[in-house]
Amino acid sequence: MSLPTVLEVIPGTPAEVSGLVAGDELVSVNGVIPNDVIEYQQLVDDVDPVFLLRRDGADIETVVVKDEGVPIGLRLGSSIFDRVQTCDNHCSFCFIYQLPPGMRQSLYLKDDDYRLSFLYGNFTTLTRFTELDLARVVEDRLGPLYVSIHATDPDIRADMLRNRRGATSLRWLEALLESNITVHGQIVLCPDINNGEVLERTLAEILTRFSGLTTLGIVPLGLSKYNTEPSLRVHTRQEADADLEIVHFWSERALKTVGRRIFQASDELYVTAGIDVPTTSVYEGFEQHENGIGMIRAFYDELDRLENGSSSSAPIVTGEWRSMPAAPAEGYRAERHPSHDPSAESGPLVVLTGAYGKSILEPVRTRLEGLANRKIRLLEVPNTFFGGNTAVAGLMVGEDIIDTINNDRGPVGAYVIPDVSLSGDMFIDDVALGDVAAAAQAPVVVAPATASGLLGAAR
């Protein structure tokens, strides 16, 4: 078990007043060695918590004087202090198996940890879930959780996970729902494996057995050029259309039966089928926005509000890490260094995005230009790094962006990169944001992948 390190002490908080400093290692709080940031947060909410710290190799005991519930003012360097529960499944469709060799080690780590599901919205299969885990989730009310279902047929699910426990682990989902824990589900839809008739049976059984699910997202399989599974292929347009019909049918059935639609299809399926995305009400609060579900509709709704002069709001990110000041931001939530202010630059704003992003933005580009009072050019970044059907902006890599910028001959005042393609200052291929900026012939700006985020980059 590694000791969590204090990354930051917020000025003026009880932690600073009590002498805690960045670099301190946390040994225990009130005599308890916390296993994760969730347990830590519960301990430090008490009155005057007693910290045992390790500083320069020496242990120091400090009482932090504070009232109950008052924020202590620390940010830690990790969320899990003991050991991340790794995934023991071997799903053929797992994107980690489709990464090229030689990337940073952390990208190859498969987690199946309910704590990361709670904190960051990571999906868990529950194949390593235990009675002790259930007891803690229920006692501490650790919801929402995010569960990968894929199929309710035991044999099909076990085959998809390549784990015999896949046939029985949905009993934990049943137990969670019976305990009124909020759960969002997911199906990764693989043609010839769990789509079509299998999808129909899965949605029917979910409505009868797991109707307490808040939402169930149905997302299509993503394939890179490194896929080695001959049974895997992407949806055809006709298959996407047929699977959407199934989702729509059971969504309406759920609405009549339990008062919620529950079933929501990925934007990618609509784009593949060439069908417009549904209206706002279908997404029931955009609970799976980060899973690529409702992003198009949320973007268009936000654009409508901006044009009408209403206050702009976008769906919030999943997970509870924001409500725990000590939990570090991860992935695209991680802090990036400030980018260049393009407001004084002349020339159009050039938005770098994938094929799907371009198809979403092109129909509203002139509307965005009117709000920004500036020309906007959309520049598609072909994903040669991953290949396959990886056309989402979140999988754009620095290498491909640099190539695209170098080959760009159009007018440009500034390049805009969506924040979802970055983890801190790094792209997934270990190219730094600074390397992209150095290669560009104009300033590079990182912006949230929302209407207001894009417009903010233009001002």
Image (cartoon, rainbow, N blue to C red):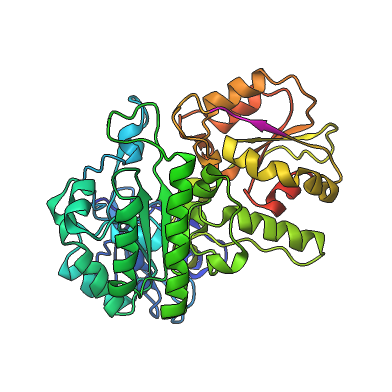
- Residue 381 on the magenta span: yes
Residue 323 placement, left or right of 299? left
Kindly identify the residue that appears in the image at 48 percent across and 62 percent down. Answer: 248
Which of the two residues, 185 or 60, is positioned nearer the viewer here? Answer: 185
* Residue furthest left in the image: 164
Which of the two residues, 104 or 401, is positioned nearer the viewer here? Answer: 401
Majority secondary structure of magenta residues: strand
Residue 328 placement, left or right of 207? right
In this rendering, the answer to whether 150 lies above or below 286 is: above
Kindly identify the residue that appears in the image at 37 percent across and 48 percent down. Answer: 189
Residue 351 pos. (x, y %):
69, 36
Residue 271 pos. (x, y %):
56, 45
Residue 165 in view (yes/no): yes
In this rendering, the answer to whether 415 lies above or below 307 is: above
Which of the two residues, 144 or 18, is positioned nearer the viewer here? Answer: 144
Residue 292 pos. (x, y %):
50, 51
Res 115 quadrant in image: bottom left
Kindly identify the residue that appears in the image at 26 percent across and 61 percent down. Answer: 35
Residue 358 pos. (x, y %):
64, 38
For the magenta stretch, what is the residue range? 378-382
Which of the two residues, 194 or 107, is positioned nearer the viewer here? Answer: 194
Disc count in the image? 0
Kindly identify the residue that appears in the image at 30 percent across and 50 percent down. Answer: 194
Residue 114 placement, left or right of 18? left
- Residue 249 on the magenta span: no
Residue 136 in view (yes/no): no
